[in-house]
């Protein structure tokens, strides 16, 4: 397994989230949906073309 620090941090975060939700997939999805609602103003829609996403990141309005 790759031991790159960034990947290790991601794996640890995923493990903590899973444990917080009792390793229940439905609860993990509910948690994910709740976070997306909470931080919706920070998220960029996936259906936005990459060139638009980059311009949004560089020139936030």
Image: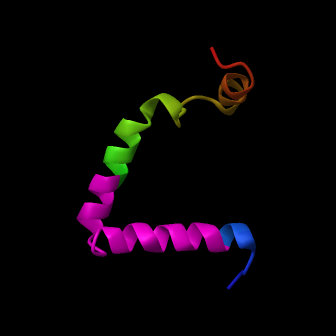
Kindly identify the residue that appears in the image at 33 percent across and 69 percent down: 20
Is 1 situated left or right of 44 in this image?
right
Q: Position of residue 58 (x, y in %)?
A: 75, 25
Residue 18 is a magenta residue: yes
Q: Quadrant of the C terminus?
A: top right
Q: Quadrant of residue 36?
A: top left
The stretch in magenta equals 8-31
Q: Quadrant of residue 49?
A: top right
Q: Quadrant of residue 11?
A: bottom right
Kindly identify the residue that appears in the image at 69 percent across and 28 percent down: 57
Q: Position of residue 59 (x, y in %)?
A: 72, 19
Q: Position of residue 35 (x, y in %)?
A: 38, 46
Check the image and report above or below for 26 versus 15. above
**Number of marks in the image?**
0
**What type of secondary structure mainly makes up the magenta span?**
helix
Is 59 situated left or right of 40 in this image?
right
Q: Nearer the viewer, residue 25 or 38?
A: 38
Q: Quadrant of the N terminus?
A: bottom right
Q: How is the image coloured?
A: rainbow
Check the image and report above or below for 60 versus 28. above
Kindly identify the residue that appears in the image at 31 percent across and 57 percent down: 29
Kindly identify the residue that appears in the image at 59 percent across and 66 percent down: 10
């Amino acid at each position: 397994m790759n031991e790159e620090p960034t990947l290790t941090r991601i794996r640890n975060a995923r493990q903590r989230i899973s444990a917080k939700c009792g390793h229940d997939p439905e609860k993990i999805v509910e948690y994910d949906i709740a976070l997306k609602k909470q931080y919706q103003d920070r998220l960029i829609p996936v259906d936005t073309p990459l060139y638009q996403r980059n311009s949004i990141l560089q020139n936030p309005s």
